[in-house]
Image (spheres, rainbow, N blue to C red):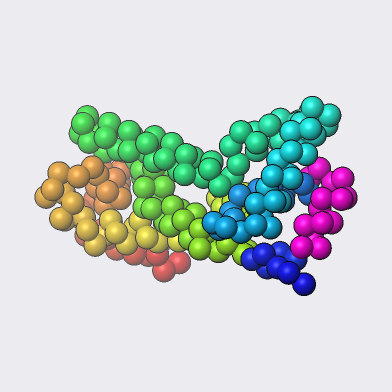
Amino acid sequence: MEKSKGIPTTMISMKIHSGDVKGMLELYEAAQFQPHGENILEEALSFSTFHLKFAETTVNYPFSIQIANALKRPIRKSVPRLIARSYISIYEACAKWLHENCIPTMEEYMSIALVSSGYWLITISSFAGMEESITKETFNWAFNDPKIIIASSIICRLMSDIVGHKVEQERGHASSAVECYMKQYGVSIQEPHDELYKLLVL
């Protein structure tokens, strides 16, 4: 049986002939990740695009909107834009803190710092090398703040702040978790190091 990146042609045929619009949408999204010259997935993309354009005018709301959005900007093209937008917002906040010489609370800082740590970006980017297993559900999972990504981001962010605190302040960087903790709780520099390390080993 001929296969394309692990997708049997019979599976594609089943999607094509089933009349399952949801399945057609999934096929359309999967076909977006086709490597150059992959004829089967090119055909699947053309076929699913044609039928989704028709389905967009016949299915009920809100599924019709979902189809319209997918045709306009499939997941593969949406991810970089979403990442860029989130990072622009994050760094605007950091720039404001630095310009106004403002030290935020730990809660305010961590809400921004978890994104700027880059761990979430690394996770999303790593999906690019998983062509055979990547699905729409994979991205939905990542965009809904799973605990493992949050925990990993906290560890990376706090470790970076603890280790790089002195150098970053000498270079005039925005406040790190160390400064935020010191100001919020009125303590000396050693206590934030001790308390933040405790968070890492809990």
Is 92 left or right of 32, judged from the image as shown? Answer: left
Is 62 left or right of 136, judged from the image as shown? Answer: right
Q: Quadrant of residue 172?
A: top left
The residue shown at (35%, 56%) is 157
| Residue ranking furthest to the left | 170
What is the x, y in percent for residue 17?
Answer: 87, 50
* Viewer-nearest residue: 97 or 76: 76
* Viewer-nearest residue: 96 or 124: 124
Evaluate whether residue 82 shows in this view: yes
The residue shown at (41%, 47%) is 115
Is 164 left or right of 52, judged from the image as shown? Answer: left
| Residue ranking furthest to the bottom | 1
Q: Vertical placement of 35 versus 64: above or below?
A: below
What is the x, y in percent for residue 29?
Answer: 66, 48
The residue shown at (70%, 40%) is 49
Give the magenta-colored segment's residue range: 9-22
Task: Name the image quarter holding the C terminus.
Answer: bottom left
* Viewer-nearest residue: 50 or 188: 50
Task: Name the image quarter holding the N terminus.
Answer: bottom right
Q: How many marks?
A: 0
What is the x, y in percent for residue 25?
Answer: 73, 45
What is the x, y in percent for residue 47?
Answer: 74, 45
Q: Vertical placement of 145 versus 196: above or below?
A: above
Residue 57 in magenta stretch? no
